[in-house]
Amino acid sequence: MKNIIITGGAGFIGSHVVRLFVNKYPDYHIINVDKLTYAGNLANLKDIEDKPNYTFVKADICDFETIMGIFKKYNVDGVIHLAAESHVDRSIKDPFTFAQTNVMGTLSMLQAAKLTWEQLPEKWEGKRFYHISTDEVYGALELTNPEGIEPPFTTKASSGKHHLAYGSKFFTEDLKYMPHSPYSASKASSDHFVRAFHDTYGMPTIVTNCSNNYGPYQFPEKLIPLFINNIRHRKPLPVYGKGENVRDWLYVEDHARAIDLIFHKGKVAETYNIGGFNEWKNIDIIKVVINTVDRLLGRKEGEDMDLITFVTDRAGHDMRYAIDSSKLQRELGWEPSLQFEEGIEKTVKWYLENQAWMDNITSGEYEKYYESMYANR
Ligand code: NAD
Ligand code: TYD
């Protein structure tokens, strides 16, 4: 049996990764290490919490002694590290917490893995430290069009496939890091530490950088779930700036599938970019979300367009993110499984059908409830 720590497993992406691993690999023991910050929610894992190959440990990744204890207790073979502070707007208000969790927390995980694994007779053999990062470390791309046609225009990725884009450049694995927000700066720093542990000590590490995720269980401070909930309650939709910024959206289960593939088949010391070649201007995606929510609620499609409210732009707002995931597609054969239209329909339906999940979070009650439930485990 393999013992695998997944950090941040009670969060948005982490819960999908935990669910996939617990269900797909009954021979693995999955240890979900999560502090349960405002973003961590054990309700995200209700369906698998009683599985025999799953253990939840409430712990702070910055608490090195506790993390060392977890490594010793569970004889850990691998780490999939997702725990982080993840929201750009919060990082602008409170950069210290981001440096603490994302940089020091990652360092604490790395050091615990190193001290534990290097003492084993087999040392690094069969071990893996997989760090989940973001495309935001590469900075911002411009909105351009070399042919003078109104974007989005058809372009070709290095894989040879055609797709729509808002610019001629893409994030590839060899790009220099140019983070702009305290969030992306802290993630960039953590990526550097992970690579340094490979280069200095020989730890078998992997880093992946993924584009914006969407899907069920995302904390409703992020664009898509926030707007779905606001439309439902007919609250204003705060669009930053002119809504011209472009993001590259990937359905969260496709990210989880990529993580599974890379954890098992990815090459040590490599970086893989993960994205679905799916660029959208914020304002366009917001219109799709409004139409979908309206239709599914039996309202007249588009009747809630007047909720769109342009507000002061985010400080240092990155203009465009666009991932070139050709390397992952070429070397490991990964493809996103869902078209965006299908993914957004599934996502909106899920939030509308799980209003209790949303109400618990937005009322703040879930945290206390689960804190007390798991306090003595
Ligand atoms: P999230 O904010 O939904 O979840 C983060 C989880 O980490 C929560 O469960 C929280 O309780 C936990 N956590 C935070 N601080 C902790 C600490 N000190 N100790 C232990 N646990 C702690 O985040 P997410 O959107 O699921 O992102 C997960 C990872 O994926 C992050 O590393 C993020 O940088 C990366 N990522 C996210 C996206 C995206 O679009 N959401 C895209 C690319 C990469
Ligand atoms: P977000 O979901 O916060 O992800 P990120 O900043 O990591 O890309 O935001 C996605 C885009 O939507 C980003 O360009 C900021 C914008 N946005 C708004 O316009 N209004 C909002 O209320 C939020 C949360 C985001």
Image (cartoon, grey):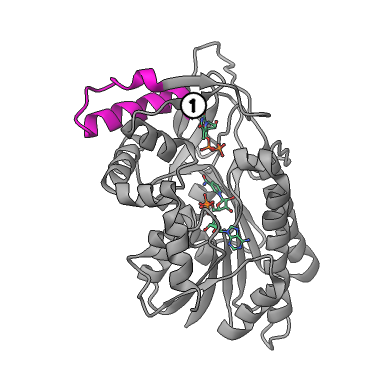
Q: Is residue 287 magenta?
A: yes
Position in image of residue 10 (x %, y %)? 48, 61
Classified by dominant secondary structure, the portion drawn in magenta counts as helix
Visible in this render: residue 257?
no
The residue shown at (71%, 39%) is: 179
Under 8 Å from ligand 2: the CB of mark 1? Answer: yes
The residue shown at (37%, 36%) is: 228
Horizontal relation, residue 350 to residue 62: left or right? left
The residue shown at (50%, 12%) is: 149
Visible in this render: residue 40?
yes
Residue 321, quarter of the rendered image: top right
Magenta span of residues:
280-307
Mark 1 burial class by Cα count in 10 Å: few <14, some 14-19, many 20+: some
Position in image of residue 104 (x %, y %)? 73, 60
Residue 71 vertical placement versus 294 (above, below): below
Q: Which residue is mark 1?
A: 238
Residue 364 vertical placement versus 303 (above, below): below
Q: Between 72 and 166, which is closer to the camera in this rendering? A: 72
Local secondary structure at mark 1 = strand
The residue shown at (32%, 44%) is: 351
Position in image of residue 152 (x %, y %)? 47, 21
Q: Which residue is most to the top?
A: 148
Q: Which residue is most to the left?
A: 298
Q: Is residue 334 magenta?
A: no
Position in image of residue 183 (x %, y %)? 66, 44
Amino acid beneath label 1: Pro
Number of on-image labels: 1
